[in-house]
Image (cartoon, rainbow, N blue to C red):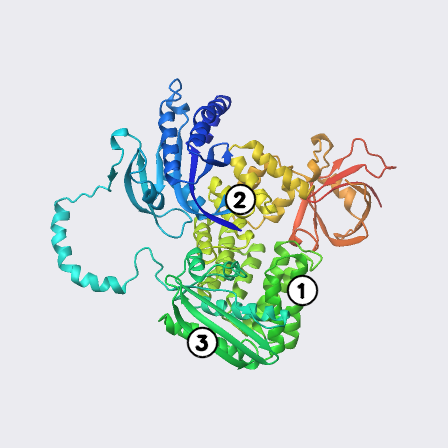
């Protein structure tokens, strides 16, 4: 991964969607002419490199901040004299943001906070204006033919620390000038100054004891993956397990801010020094170490480092027996707490001191499972489930093994790994495992976080909110618990609160797994922040979004009126899952508490051209069967026919509502019901065990001989059949 310092210019068309809505053809023509006559020449003149050209903006890289500012100024001055023949409502104007910062280079593209800050700065600029960061100002001041007006420190969305911001003054008479923010003191203000002066001495004493307004008010720490120095390469899991346990214990301390495992482990096997890591994770302290295990002997070296200075705050070497591993972890935690002068509550002290298991073989299996479960692929998840089961068998009272097993099963549900465990069975097992975990440890945040998701899927939204809130209270630094809360709040219809939770997730886990950005995109979409939703999805996987990522891109682009982009995302969805349709998603997302939230998603996907039924089946209204005809066709009958792909099937429907379906070397059983003019089925092997209802149509070209007199479109296929007693 290559990094470099670069000057980044982000430009955006003001009111692009409105302009396109008023005059699409004319706007596109003027925009193309603008790029040809103004944008491209200015970029070329000042040696810029175009990274991206979007319909409504551009991202450009410069080797020099001065060149970036000169380019932006030349462009905006030229734009001020363009489009004089159109109305103000039709005029094309740009906002521009410029930042000097560290960027990640991947092919021809760049990412990172250096880019994100530039994009945020352009939103602060006035139409036709430019805003730059303090780092850019420091290099450009008195070197470009512009002036600057200081706007002070600004909090930019999703940027952890405040950023100094300056507005560029394009008026030639202001060139070379730097204008400070105006300060006004009225009569009351003058009188108040005397009072303030008398308090300065006392305030000074308080100042040095009180945290700075923009600094974290709690000591912040990241635990980097411990290195395994054993000659046995198979001991790597033990080093990871020790790191995981330390992060988990520190996370329970409300007086600390602790970076999540995913972000900490992103620095595994890197050559970055501690100060660089601390800067990227926005923490003051870093804990690092190494572990060597040989038989029952364990040697651990550990040191706590000040990320600002690189100075070692505390260091220790431990030579212990493996049977003392939990006591050793407690000692390390105690030293960290003492070094950072953090006070523990009685509950926190009890939680940390709690012995997870006395069976070290069970702990070994649990540690191996924890290493596997974060990979989130079919094979690793299956191995993790087996290892959790082994740990539980060795120690049935090992609470963490039960809750780990429950969490892994939730991933089985989330990623639809049906061959591992059928969804309905998986949900029941997850409930049982989480419940058993809470019986053994009533203070388990992971158990409550899992319960919250399960309750949400069952439509028990109030209970789900209570569970995830409890999880966060027990694990105040738990990014996973906070993520589950954001998800539950989204389906509860509490979208602003979900966004707050999601932004906290990214503070605790600034380098999360890619799926977190997908959830962030969903939360932003539900808050009607469509551009930001697209940006979140593109953050980690710009070229190959996940299934949820494609869905968000389709919805957000549809809402922004970008029909081609929305339709392209739907086409990509259908290439992966040809039978994907609104009917399926209506069932999958049925746990939305508010109908308007579900409609907000499905209506946008409909605009993006996602079909209503699988394989875009569209029956004619005159061919649709009514309730009586469906009843006559279903009760105590056998359906024989084929699916859309020609594969044959037999389906036996009993008078009591049972059905058995044999198709493609598989047997599926479940229940069917007749509801108004719909035929409804429910089976544990599909759609989270939920009911799906479909219309039934006569097939105008069907016949008894071909077994295709009728058609049943539903969430995953289209079934052609004839019925017989």
The one of 622 and 475 positioned closer to us in this rendering? 475
**How many angstroms separate mark 2 from mark 3 (CA)?**
43 Å
Pointer 1 residue = 383
- Quick one: label 3, few (<14), some, or many (20+) residues within 10 Å? few
In front of the other: label 1 or label 3? Answer: 3
Label 2 – label 1 distance at C-alpha: 31 Å
From mark 1 to mark 3, how far is it between C-alphas? 35 Å
Quick one: 567 or 666, which is closer to the camera? 567
Q: Position of residue 58 (x, y in %)?
A: 47, 35
Whether 162 is drawn above or below 420: the answer is above
Checking the image for residue 316, the label placed there is 3
Tell me the SS state at disc 3.
strand
Q: Secondary structure at mark 1?
A: helix
Residue 702: give x, y in percent of width and height: 82, 34
Considering only vertical position in the picture, is 609 above or below 224?
above
Q: Earlier in the sequence, mark 2 or mark 1?
A: 1
Give the label on residue 697, or none.
none
Q: Residue 419 appears at what percent x and percent y? A: 71, 57
Relative placement, left or right, of 646 versus 290 is right
Residue 232 falls in image quadrant: bottom right
> Sequence order check: which comes first, mark 2 or mark 3?
3
Q: Residue at x 40, y 19 (%)?
A: 86
Report the residue at 36% width, 25% height from top.
80
Contact, CB < 8 Å: mark 2 with mark 1?
no
Residue 422 can be seen, yes or no: yes
Q: How many circles with numbers are drawn on the protein?
A: 3
User: Label 1 neighbourhood size at 10 Å, few (<14), some (14-19), many (20+)?
Assistant: some
Task: Locate residue 355 relative to residue 98 in the image: left or right.
Answer: right
Report the disc number at residue 538. 2
The residue sitting at the right extreme is 705
């Amino acid at each position: 991964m290559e990094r470099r310092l670069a000057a980044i210019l982000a430009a955006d068309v003001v009111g692009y969607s409105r302009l396109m809505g008023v005059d699409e053809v004319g706007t596109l023509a003027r925009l193309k002419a603008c790029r040809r006559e103004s944008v491209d020449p200015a970029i070329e003149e000042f040696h810029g490199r175009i990274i991206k050209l979007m319909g409504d903006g551009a991202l450009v890289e410069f080797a020099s901040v001065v060149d970036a500012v000169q380019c932006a100024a030349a462009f905006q001055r030229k734009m001020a004299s363009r489009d004089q023949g159109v109305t103000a409502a039709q005029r094309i104007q740009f906002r521009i943001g410029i930042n000097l910062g560290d960027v990640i280079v991947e092919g021809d593209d760049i990412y990172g906070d250096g880019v994100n800050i530039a994009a945020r700065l352009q939103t602060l600029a006035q139409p036709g204006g430019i805003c730059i960061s303090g780092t850019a100002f420091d290099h450009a001041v008195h070197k470009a033919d512009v002036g600057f007006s200081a706007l002070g420190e600004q909090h930019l969305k999703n940027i952890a620390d405040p950023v100094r911001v300056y507005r560029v003054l394009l008026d030639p008479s202001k060139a070379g000038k730097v204008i400070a923010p105006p300060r006004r003191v009225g009569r009351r203000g003058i009188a108040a100054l005397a009072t303030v002066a008398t308090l300065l001495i006392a305030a000074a004493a308080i100042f040095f004891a009180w945290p700075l307004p923009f600094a974290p008010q709690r000591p912040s720490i990241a635990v980097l993956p411990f290195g395994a120095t054993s000659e046995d390469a198979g001991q790597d899991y033990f080093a990871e397990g020790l790191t995981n346990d330390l992060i988990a214990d520190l996370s329970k301390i409300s007086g600390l801010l602790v970076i999540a495992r995913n972000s900490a482990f992103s620095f595994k096997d890197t050559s970055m020094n501690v100060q660089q890591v601390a800067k990227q994770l926005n923490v003051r302290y870093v804990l690092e170490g190494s572990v060597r295990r040989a038989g029952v002997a364990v040697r651990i070296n550990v040191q706590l480092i000040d990320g600002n200075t690189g100075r070692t705050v505390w260091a220790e070497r431990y030579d212990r027996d493996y049977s003392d591993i939990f006591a050793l972890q407690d000692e390390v935690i105690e030293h960290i707490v003492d070094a950072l002068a953090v006070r523990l509550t009685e509950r926190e002290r009890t939680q940390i001191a709690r012995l997870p298991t006395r069976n070290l073989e069970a702990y070994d299996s649990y540690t191996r499972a924890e290493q596997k479960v974060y990979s989130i692929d079919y094979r690793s998840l299956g191995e993790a489930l087996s290892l959790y089961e082994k740990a539980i068998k060795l120690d049935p009272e090992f609470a963490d093994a039960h809750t780990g097993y429950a969490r892994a099963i939730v991933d089985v549900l989330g990623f639809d790994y049906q061959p591992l465990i059928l969804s309905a069975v998986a949900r029941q097992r997850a409930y049982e495992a989480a419940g058993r975990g809470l019986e053994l440890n009533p203070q388990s945040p992971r158990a409550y976080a899992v319960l919250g998701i399960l309750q949400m899927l069952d439509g028990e939204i109030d209970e789900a909110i209570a569970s995830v809130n409890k999880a966060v209270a027990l694990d105040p630094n738990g990014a996973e618990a906070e993520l589950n809360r954001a998800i539950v709040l989204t389906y509860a219809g509490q979208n602003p609160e979900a966004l707050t939770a999601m932004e906290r997730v990214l503070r605790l886990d600034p380098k999360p797994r890619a799926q977190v950005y997908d959830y962030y995109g969903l939360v932003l979409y539900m808050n009607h922040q469509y551009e930001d939703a697209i940006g979140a999805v593109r953050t980690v996987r710009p070229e190959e979004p996940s299934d949820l990522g494609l869905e968000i891109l389709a919805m957000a682009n549809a809402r922004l009126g970008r029909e081609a982009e929305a339709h392209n995302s739907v086409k990509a969805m259908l290439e992966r899952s040809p039978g994907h349709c609104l009917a399926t998603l209506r069932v999958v997302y049925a746990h939305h508490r508010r109908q308007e939230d579900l409609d907000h998603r499905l209506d946008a996907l409909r605009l993006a051209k996602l079909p209503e039924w699988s394989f875009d089946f569209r029956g004619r209204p005159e061919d649709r069967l009514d309730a009586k005809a469906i009843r006559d066709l279903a009760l105590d009958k056998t359906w024989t026919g084929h699916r859309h792909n020609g594969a044959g099937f037999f389906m036996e429907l009993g008078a009591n509502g049972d059905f058995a379906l044999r198709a493609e070397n598989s047997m599926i059983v479940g229940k069917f019901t007749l509801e108004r003019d719909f035929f409804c089925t429910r089976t544990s092997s599909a759609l989270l065990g939920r009911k799906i209802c479909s219309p039934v149509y006569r097939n105008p070209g069907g016949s008894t001989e071909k077994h295709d007199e009728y058609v049943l479109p539903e969430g995953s296929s289209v079934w052609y059949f004839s019925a017989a007693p």
